[in-house]
Image (spheres, rainbow, N blue to C red):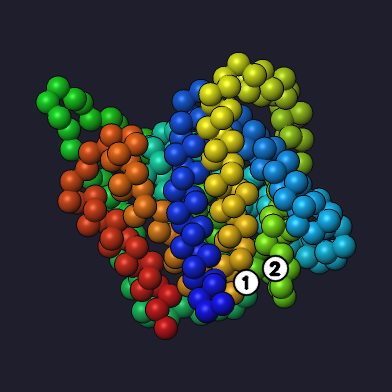
């Protein structure tokens, strides 16, 4: 199928926009740590079922040690650590700005590829990096429009930093996943390997932090939050992440990264209709500039 990688990357952006809604609403009842543990657990169980139905084995133990290494490593970097920063960013600055900061991931991907794989950046790519940062800064510094009687919410510096760290984690996870998805390895199989690493890392950490009981109790006490976490898990680490692996298999990492940086554009109408967030032309223009810079970064 022509452009299957590009179509998969666009679909990934749409799925991640929907998952941002679920995790943001779940974040009203759960801490970011609880959300991260709950969503990887739900996603892992769903992926076991999907892989069992599609390939006859819930976990692909015959994938080979090299593939397991790269995908496990990418799962820890991207799904466990990177997403922990992302969910905290959602709580502090909201899903629209959190996803906009996440669109920095292609820039970090280029930097990682240069440092570890010797891929040199061209002058046009540096221009793209600058334009992307200008666009993101424009939106972050633009305050939403208010109605009479409303007050501005303060922009959290920690939330912005956590969003940047999330972008670094996603970039690292994507580059590492590219190494593990060589050939025609099934995306759902690759995702369950990544999720295996994430669930082990997060729950072992919870054991040492003595937070297992509090996490389980929180999930029991807030069924509506659990439902939104399940919604986010379905469109995020299950469908979205699997679609992203399909994208990097059939398209260049730069092209796929650029298309997967589009959730801020999808989030403009979603934020308006779902979260009743009002914003002016500056937010729209800044978002378009940021995405244009990302596209320019990987322009051949």
Does 288 sit above or below residue 248? above
| Residue that appears at 23% across and 30% down | 152
Tell whether 219 sits left or right of 145.
Answer: right
Q: Secondary structure at mark 1?
A: helix
Q: Nearer the viewer, residue 50 or 137?
A: 50
* Pick the front one: 9 or 168: 9
Side (left or right) of 94 relative to 141:
right
Instruction: Point out which mark residue 160 bears.
Output: none
What quarter of the picture does the N terminus occupy?
bottom right
Badge number at residue 249:
1
Give the residue drawn at x 57%, y 61%. 244
Identify the residue under disc 2: 181
Quarter placement of the C terminus? bottom left
Q: Which percent across, then down, holds residue 220?
A: 64, 19
Image side of residue 190 versus residue 246, left or right: right
Give percent across and percent down for residue 222: 57, 19
Left or right placement of residue 269 versus residue 66 in this view:
left
Return the disc, 2 or 1, that comes first in the chain's sequence.
2
Is residue 247 visible in the rendered image? The answer is: yes
Question: Is 300 in front, or is 62?
Answer: 62
Q: CA distance from mark 2 to mark 1?
A: 7 Å
SS type, badge 2: loop
Task: Tell me if residue 2 comes above or below residue 26 in the rendering.
Answer: below
Q: Are marks 2 and 1 in contact (CB under 8 Å)?
A: yes
Whether residue 102 is visible? no
The residue that appears at 62% across and 63% down in the rendered structure is 245
Q: Nearer the viewer, residue 18 or 288?
A: 18
């Amino acid at each position: 199928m022509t452009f299957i990688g590009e179509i998969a990357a666009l679909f990934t952006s749409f799925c991640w926009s929907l998952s941002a809604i679920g995790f943001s609403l779940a974040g009203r009842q759960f801490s970011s740590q609880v959300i991260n543990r709950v969503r990887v657990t739900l996603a892992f169980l769903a992926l076991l079922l999907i892989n069992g139905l599609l390939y006859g084995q819930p976990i692909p133990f015959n994938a080979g040690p090299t593939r397991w290494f790269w995908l496990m490593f990418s799962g820890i970097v991207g799904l466990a650590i990177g997403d922990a920063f992302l969910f905290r960013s959602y709580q502090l600055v909201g899903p629209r700005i959190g996803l906009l900061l996440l669109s920095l991931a292609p820039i970090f991907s280029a930097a990682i590829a240069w440092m570890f794989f010797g891929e040199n950046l061209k002058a046009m790519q540096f221009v793209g990096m600058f334009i992307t940062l200008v666009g993101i800064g424009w939106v972050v510094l633009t305050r939403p429009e208010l109605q009479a009687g409303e007050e501005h919410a303060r922009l959290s510096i920690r939330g912005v930093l956590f969003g940047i760290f999330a972008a670094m984690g996603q970039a690292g996870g994507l580059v590492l996943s590219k190494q593990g998805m060589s050939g025609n390895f099934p995306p759902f199989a690759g995702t369950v390997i990544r999720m295996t690493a994430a669930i082990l890392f997060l729950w072992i950490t919870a054991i040492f932090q003595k937070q297992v009981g509090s996490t389980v109790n929180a999930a029991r006490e807030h069924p509506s939050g659990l439902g939104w976490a399940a919604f986010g898990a379905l469109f995020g680490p299950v469908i979205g992440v699997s679609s992203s692996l399909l994208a990097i298999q059939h398209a260049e990492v730069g092209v796929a990264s650029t298309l997967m940086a589009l959730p801020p554009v999808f989030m403009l109408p979603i934020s308006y209709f779902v979260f009743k967030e009002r914003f002016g032309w500056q937010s729209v223009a800044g978002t378009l500039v940021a995405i244009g810079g990302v596209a320019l970064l990987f322009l051949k």
